Amino acid sequence: MTSPTYDGQALFASGPTHCEVGGAALAFAEHQPLHGQGSGLFSQGRQGRAITQTGTLIADTVDALQQQINAIEAYVDGTARELVDERDRPWPNMVMLAFEPSVMRRLGVRWQVSYRVQYRQVRP
């Protein structure tokens, strides 16, 4: 296994990480049929997959850890890019919706921060 990349950048390589890939889903609108029995659906096509990534960033100093956080947060901009997960599976057209770091903590002489990233696949 390797560290995930986003837009070809190894943003998460400093510590362990894992991507949880959601299943396929259909976007739809529910409606009531004319005769009032049961329900109907208007298909709006397949939804993009949701991927949640969790992990830990590690650095020698608080400043170095903050630089990693800043580099990741710069990608929360609504632009679709390719995510390659830790199993080297490419996921095209992924938008980074949220990056949620926890509190920085000591890890021996180093520093760490746990995080959660949410992605959504969009149509090109």
Image: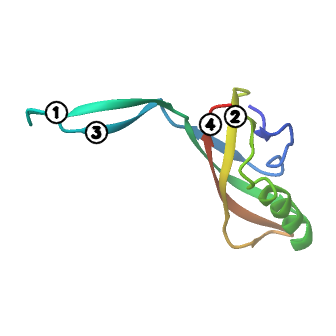
Q: Which residue is mark 4?
A: 122
Label 3 environment density (alpha carbons within 10 Å; few <14, some 14–19, many ≥20): few
- Tell me which numbered mark, 4 or 2, is placed earlier along the sequence: 2
Q: Position of residue 107 (x, y in %)?
A: 78, 67
Tell me which amino acid carries mark 2: Asn
**Scheme of colours in the image:** rainbow
Q: Which residue is mark 2?
A: 93
In the image, is 21 to the left or to the right of 99?
left
- Secondary structure state at the residue bearing disc 4: loop
Q: CB under 8 Å between callouts 3 and 1?
A: no
Q: Examine the image and state in which quarter residue 26 appears.
A: top left
Q: Position of residue 56 (x, y in %)?
A: 72, 56
Q: Residue at x 81, y 62 (%)?
A: 69
- Tell me which numbered mark, 2 or 3, is placed earlier along the sequence: 3
Q: Which residue is mark 3?
A: 30
Q: Nearer the viewer, mark 3 or mark 1?
A: 1
Q: CB under 8 Å between callouts 2 and 3?
A: no
Q: Examine the image and state in which quarter residue 20 appears.
A: top right
Q: Nearer the viewer, mark 3 or mark 4?
A: 3
Q: CB under 8 Å between callouts 4 and 2?
A: yes
